Image: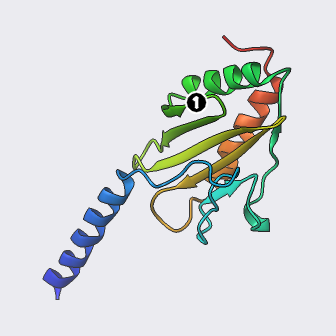
Amino acid sequence: MFKSVLGIVLILAIYMLIKNNTYPELGIVDNKLRELDNKPHGVSSQTDQKEKKVDALEYRDSLEESKKIILSILKEDDADIIVDTDNYIRAVYKTKLMRYKDDVEFYFDGNLVQYRSESRVGYSDAGLNLKRYKDIKRRYQGSDGLE
């Protein structure tokens, strides 16, 4: 019995390790960030799921200024910037204790910054992605043009 439980735990640990280190297919599809999955471990400004919906951020003066502020926040947070194009930024945050990875996306759409953040593994994130969004939003809106 102990060996079978240990085997199941080992298989789950390997699965989580692989999933945590595999980049999910993200980005912009049909002028929109991809939809979140059905697990309660993410938030998006473009989702139809009410409990996961957050507000898009309004541009600060211009696209360039908005991108500059977002990139500054990501660098301050020591997030890994994976993609940085004219209208899209993708970064990865790692939780401190377990090193779980959350994919965070910013889509510069018209005069809005669309936002999406989702954990790669697990069912719930205990509200971490919503908390991160609120922190980024506060810093973004309060910024006087970070360097």
At 62% from the left and 24% from the top, the residue drawn is 71
Per the image, the residue denoted by label 1 is 85
Query: Camera-side residue: 42 or 4?
Result: 42
**Residue shown at 70% from the left, 50% from the top:** 31
Number of numbered discs overlaid on the protein picture: 1
Residue 143 x, y percent position in the rendering: 78, 20
Q: Which residue, as the protein is rendered here, is positioned at the far left?
A: 3
Q: Quadrant of the N terminus?
A: bottom left
123 lies above or below 118: below
Quadrant in which the C terminus is drawn? top right
Where is residue 25? Give x, y as percent.
Answer: 48, 55
Q: Secondary structure at mark 1?
A: loop
* Residue type for callout 1: Thr
Question: Furthest-bottom residue in view?
Answer: 1
User: Farthest residue in the top direction?
Assistant: 147
Quick one: 100 or 60, which is closer to the camera? 60
Q: Residue at x 66, y 33 (%)?
A: 87
- For the point 77% across and 58% down, which residue is it? 53
Measuring from the top left, give residue 57's x and y in whole percent.
81, 38
Q: Is residue 36 left or right of residue 8?
A: right
Q: Residue 89 placed where, x, y %?
A: 59, 35
Q: Is residue 34 left or right of residue 139?
A: left
